[in-house]
Image: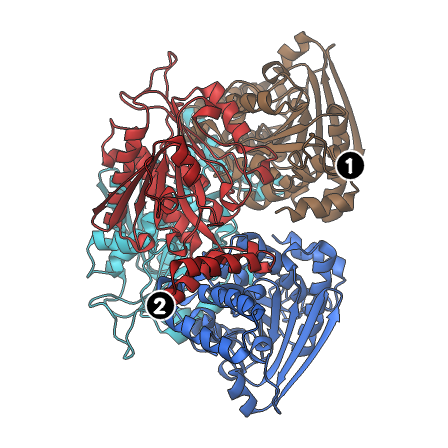
Chain colours: A brown, B cyan, C blue, D red
């Protein structure tokens, strides 16, 4: 399969190996999938680092009403609490390029974040009992800053000394249907810009020295993936075998590789609103996960008033 | 042909009919195609109104340098001058939805426009010798305003009494390769929102009472079109006949119609920058076409300082 | 009094005339002032048209929490219901220039508006029982469109035939303390752009043929007004008589008229957030006033999801 | 004088001390003022660090035409070249809060910057002969990130190892007439957020370990300063002595300190366009200063196409 995917749930689709565990459960319209990559061998096979990958999918996320979105935020918060250390400041890194709507998820999440680390007294205690320190940065992408995202974050981590980093980024989907319907949370970190072909130094516990929780949402897809999905749809119908289908796919991909279509990356026409909606869900989820001392109402008021 | 197209040059591709004239010429990297639909019969066949359709294509418009973009503006200006009446005010209508980047071309062109109609003395003469009156409006789309664009524009035309309307809108491409590489100018007017399936009352000489020059640029494409383009690419290579290919296409489209893919409309990931670049080319072209008394330098200074 | 004001409550401050009625009441932190200009003579004296002027003031509107803002929206809704006709479509006109933050209130209110007029069946009945038709437009200012706002709105009113127009605009304050703390509602219409010195044809029942309810919020102030307020503060303290003070003021204004200070119009540094906050209060108030069939929860969900 | 100023030229106005040198010259409409603070004693007196302060003033900067703006960029470039080291990468830090228009100058300059540091081959040489490495970051303000700007920049400097930092920020004016008419360049660094009362750790050679060139433009002014300027204007006219005037000023400031006016910070109504214009002048100036190998035309094309 030549098209790489950022989603472990896609990578592990046909995998039934010793080192991979999968668990699925439904909460109303929300499907939660947990993939655990337990061994180095499994990691190599899936091309995914060892660790946990928790995915929340919701077919019509974009059309979800307020109640459904709040529910999704709660689930996200619950999962983040499992993965985050109990104490210490959290640095939230909004990755991606704010000037490209389809890549602006990271920086837009920061708009909904309750930033608190500076609300400290002279002795370094928090001004409000129980408030946990959160700081945030949208460092921008290599082409805009001239610096690797990892360089920027590493420099800040060494000065700010958070107990963990949460990194948010837009991903590339390997199935058309995944776009803006799936939120992946993982404790294995993230490879900024990995989605569209430019591999950079990763953000993970090894490179940053503190746990890195990555939150990703597929926002773009290669045009060739759309072609493949349509083809698959059609061919399955005429009873073509999976093996035969894979052969046709490979051929298709080979052809289009050198055609304008080959590296065209697309996003839904409604991407502006989609990014806005998912950014709020993630922002609310992080706020709830980190600030256990505040009620949902207090959080809502504080976070959405800080704009 | 199930997939409709806003581009006459696409519609007329295989058409060699009595009532259709086509002319092509190249200016460096710019391909200019003129299609004239001369008879009602030809109009029915192409599903395009009688009139002129002039298209400028440039493979890598998005990567064009300043010299190439200025050249394209000049060509556009020359064509607009042919189609516009010699005297009287011009109303420029920037159609589309400014909140959806892929649909914001119309409103973004207005940012580059030299608006002059209000620079009049008490007797209604222009304050600057030779300046032609230009007014502009981005009325917004039905879903945002609750009013048909045609209603809004008609009301304004009756009060402002321009000698012509220039309407700018983002179009839907029928070939993936057309996205943001083609600018179509036509004297047949426009059907706002026609690109993505919602037909509304048209903007044309019949409905508005003055000539309507439409400028359109394909900015989005149906996911199924991408699938078809990829399929075509592959099948042509294995020597499949056109007839057979059309059959497969029809089947493909039938299948995907009821699948999520069926009505997914996509746009390139770089749409923010693309829209910005094309908007400037069109804005500069209109300014040059209308203000014959001003030199290119004066225009550049006046238009880009008004921001 | 050389500095004109858009606020009737300021104009009527020292007025105790036969044709002017004033009523004040407090609702917690909200001060509601109703000024009724009953005779033509009083109108001439105040330089305010005959009609009702209802003002809501709140000292720290910008720092108000969610509960206070919702309360203010309710009061606004209640007042609008008194002034609006019971039936028929409503056209909401967001006046001002969206590219100037301090003048963007009108267009920003539209972001929070529930637009419904197009949700009709073929016979012109509303798709949802009890929903009232609302349409909206941000026509832009003369300098950007080349057309008088009144021309644009009049043209649309004639086609769309609403039963009333609600026009929203940023105003000029005559007291520094009014900026973004006061919302004025009046049934006398509005003079677009009147705040900063450029008088245009008015929007009112006489020019548009339907009732015009204007909602205005002071967002800017002349630098000379700030100077005067500071001076007044200081002089009152040293026991200077009002008459003497007025003399000094006149002298001050005379001096600064020909100085750079003279026509400098300023706005608070925090204007971006202020406009956002007030826009939402007004948007929510209009929604509630117009859609009596919907509960506050339904309105919140519908209005804030349409973004 | 209780009102502090970020501009050395204002601070040194009445100073004729041993350790302060001043030089003025005019280039057409541009007034260039160089203040050199030579001794620690002079630094204490002026409350300005030892070093060079070069100021470019232009009465109607906002209304300057293209030729004047380009001229100003050239002057700025020339001054920056004097202050910058000849070799090594440059880090440009756009300070301030992008969500507050009056504070967005720093981040907006980055939009015009030619970022090049990443255009390197594997051995660390630049891909284009003669191109100098530039990287850039808009770190955001303490209230948004939860981190001191100095913390963020210091962390990055240690990883990226530039030979100098250029920091751009909006300043507070002490005279109404300075707003958006003056650009100050200094080799003494900057105190982020110093303009509006919140002192933070400074950005300077001592704290960052490399030279820090600061570029600042007054964009806001205290309302009390406007009051004082108007008062001064009036009183000078009636022949009041400077000593008496200072007394009145002190009294005025004392009064207003506890009044709403006291801490009101204002900005011109046209701040959106003003910031945009000055940001481009500064961006062009930096590009020209740093990239000596590129012609003005190449720079223009490269810098304004990168958007």
Left or right side of B129 for B47: right
Whether residue A117 is situated above or below residue C154 in the rendered picture: above
Q: Residues within 10 Å of mark 1 (few under 14, many from 20)?
A: few
Q: Are marks 2 and 1 in contact (CB under 8 Å)?
A: no
State left or right for residue C236 relative to residue A288. left
Q: Residue at x 78, y 36 (%)?
A: A129
Mark seen at residue A129: 1
Mark yes or no: residue D213 visible.
Answer: yes
Q: In this orientation, which residue lies closer to the viewer: A46 or C234?
A: C234
Residue C197 image position (x, y, % from top left): 42, 71
Q: Which numbered dot is residue D237?
A: 2
Q: Chain of mark 2?
A: D
Q: Residue at x 72, y 66 (%)?
A: C74
| Front-lying residue, A150 or A97 | A150
Residue sticking out furthest to the top: A41
Residue A228 picture quarter: top right
Q: Is A2 above or below relative to B200? A: above
Residue C206 horizontal/vertical position (percent): 51, 84
- At horizontal 23% and vertical 36% (from top left) the residue drawn is D297
- Give the foreground label among 2 and 1: 2
Q: Residue B132: image x %, image y %? A: 26, 66
Looking at the rendered structure, whether the residues under marks 2 and 1 are on a common chain is answered as no
The quadrant of the rendering that contains the N terminus of chain A is: top right
Work out whether residue C95 or residue D156 is closer to the camera in this orientation and state it.
D156
Q: Residues within 10 Å of mark 2 (few under 14, many from 20)?
A: few
Element under label 1?
loop
Q: CA distance from mark 2 to mark 1?
A: 57 Å
Decide: is A64 above or below C256. Answer: above
Chain letter of mark 1 equals A
In the visual, does A233 lie left or right of B153?
A: right
Asked where in the image residue D82 lies, by quadrant, the reply is top left
């Amino acid at each position: 399969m030549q098209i790489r995917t950022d989603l472990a749930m896609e990578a592990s689709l046909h995998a039934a190996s010793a080192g991979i565990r999968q668990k699925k459960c439904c909460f109303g319209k929300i499907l939660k999938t947990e993939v655990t990559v337990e061994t180095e061998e499994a990691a190599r096979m899936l091309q995914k680092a060892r660790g946990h990958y928790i995915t929340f999918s919701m077919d019509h996320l974009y059309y979800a009403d307020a109640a459904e979105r709040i529910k999704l935020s709660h689930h996200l918060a619950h999962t983040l609490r499992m993965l985050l250390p109990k104490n210490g400041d959290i640095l939230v890194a909004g990755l991606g390029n704010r000037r490209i709507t389809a890549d602006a998820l990271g920086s837009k999440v920061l708009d909904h974040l309750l930033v608190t680390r500076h609300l400290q007294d002279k002795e370094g205690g928090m001004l409000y009992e129980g408030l946990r320190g959160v700081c945030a940065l949208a460092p921008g992408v290599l082409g805009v800053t001239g610096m690797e995202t990892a360089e920027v974050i590493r420099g800040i981590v060494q000065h700010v000394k958070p107990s963990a980093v949460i990194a948010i980024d837009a991903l590339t989907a390997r199935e058309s249907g995944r776009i803006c319907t799936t939120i992946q949370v993982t404790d294995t970190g993230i490879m900024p810009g990995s989605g569209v072909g430019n591999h950079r130094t990763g953000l993970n516990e090894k490179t940053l020295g503190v746990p890195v929780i990555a939150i990703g949402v597929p926002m773009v897809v290669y045009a060739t993936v759309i072609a493949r999905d349509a083809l698959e749809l059609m061919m399955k119908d005429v009873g073509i075998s999976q093996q035969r289908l894979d052969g046709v796919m490979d051929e298709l991909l080979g052809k289009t590789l050198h055609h304008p279509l080959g590296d065209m990356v697309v996003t839904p026409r409604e991407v502006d609103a989609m990014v806005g909606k998912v950014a709020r869900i993630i922002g609310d989820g992080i706020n709830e996960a980190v600030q256990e001392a505040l009620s949902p109402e207090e959080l809502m008021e504080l976070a959405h008033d800080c704009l």
